[in-house]
Image (tube, rainbow, N blue to C red):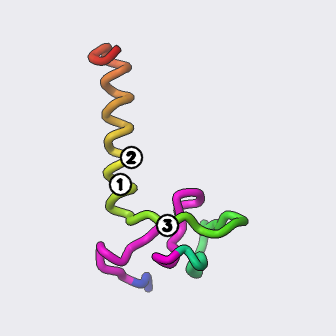
Amino acid sequence: MARKRSAEHDFICKVCNCPCEADGSRHLGGGQNMRACKGAPQPILRSEWDAMMAEMVACARDVIAGNRF
C-alpha cells in the first residue's frame, strides 16, 4: 500500500524523481523501480514539478507547430 501525502508535503528529488524529505536531508524508501541519486536530494514540490513539465511540453509543442520562434 502506498503512503499518501498531502500536496503541500509531497516532495520529490529533481535529479531522480524519487520521494524525499522537504529539507533535503534524505531520500525516502523506494519500492520497485525507485532509484535514488548518489548525492543529497534536491527537493521540489511534486505539483511544482508537474506544472514545470507541463509548461516545457507546451513550449515544445508550440515550437514544433511553428507558433514560436
Judged left or right of residue 8, residue 36 is right
At label 3, the amino acid type is Pro
- Tell me what residue is drawn at x 36 percent, y 20 percent: 63
Quarter residue 60 falls in:
top left
At label 2, the amino acid type is Met
Do the residues bearing badges 2 and 1 touch, measured as CB atoms within 8 Å? yes
Q: Pinpoint residue 34: horizontal percent, then vertical percent.
A: 60, 69
- Tell me what residue is drawn at x 38 percent, y 73 percent: 10
Q: Residue furthest right?
A: 38
- Determine if residue 30 is in view: no
- Determine if residue 44 is in view: yes
In the foreground, 10 or 24: 24
Q: Label for residue 50?
A: 1
Q: Label for residue 11?
A: none
Number of on-image labels: 3
Work out whether mark 1 precedes mark 3 in sequence or the reverse, and give the earlier one.
Answer: 3
Give the labeled residue for mark 2: 53
In the foreground, 33 or 15: 15
- Tell me what residue is drawn at x 59 percent, y 60 percent: 16
